[in-house]
Image: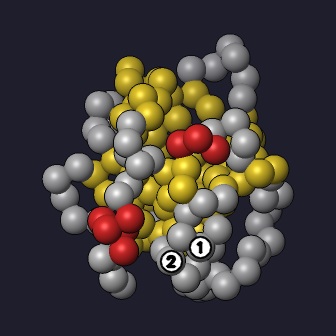
């Protein structure tokens, strides 16, 4: 099982395009491949890939949830008030409605996960550099 990815790897799904639609809510470069985006469904499914050091802002899912299925690399997941959790390929995270959290790559690895999301994200402040810089594996 691969843990660190110094370069982007091949997945069953293509990496996707640069994530311009949500770039304002990320530090660094991410890529988005919407896999299921059917307006008749209450969920969306996508693959998000983060370059090393990339992470999204703190956010909350309102009237829904988010499930992360890690497919490659190493990354971080943190809920407000708890220590950050190191994620590797095969890890799973369930974020419940209303929980403030963030996720993204470690400083030295690419990171990819599938997302299954319901509800509306409420984007908040960026993860402070000093908070991110102290994370150690």
How far apart marks 2 and 1 lie (CA) works out to 5 Å
Q: Position of residue 111 (x, y in %)?
A: 59, 68
Q: Is residue 22 left or right of residue 94?
A: right
User: Is 4 rendered above or below residue 12?
Assistant: below
Label 2: element kind: loop
Residue shown at the point (66%, 59%) measured from the top left = 29
- Front position in the image: 57 or 60: 57
User: Is 89 rendered above or below residue 45?
Assistant: below
- Front position in the image: 14 or 78: 78
The image quadrant where one finds the C terminus is bottom left
Label 1: element kind: loop
Pointer 2 or 1: first along the chain: 1
Q: Which residue is mark 2?
A: 107
User: Is 118 rendered above or below residue 133?
Assistant: above
Q: Residue furthest top?
A: 40
Q: Quadrant of residue 6?
A: bottom right
Few, some or many residues within 10 Å of mark 1 (<14, 14–19, 20+) = many
Q: Quadrant of residue 35?
A: top right
Cβ atoms under marks 2 and 1 closer than 8 Å: yes
Q: Which residue is mark 1?
A: 52
Q: Is residue 121 visible?
A: yes
């Amino acid at each position: 099982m691969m843990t660190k990815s110094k370069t982007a790897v091949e997945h069953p799904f293509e990496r996707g395009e640069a994530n311009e639609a949500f770039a304002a809510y990320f530090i660094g470069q991410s890529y988005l491949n919407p896999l299921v985006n059917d307006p008749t469904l209450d969920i969306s499914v996508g693959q998000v890939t983060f370059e090393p050091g990339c992470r999204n802002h703190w956010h909350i899912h309102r009237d829904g949830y988010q499930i992360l299925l890690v497919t490659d690399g190493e990354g971080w997941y943190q809920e407000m008030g708890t220590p950050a959790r190191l994620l590797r390929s095969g890890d799973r995270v369930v974020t419940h409605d209303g929980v403030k959290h963030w996720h993204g790559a470690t400083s030295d690895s690419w990171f990819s996960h599938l997302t299954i999301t319901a509800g509306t994200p409420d984007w908040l402040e960026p993860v402070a550099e000093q908070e991110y810089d102290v994370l150690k594996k």
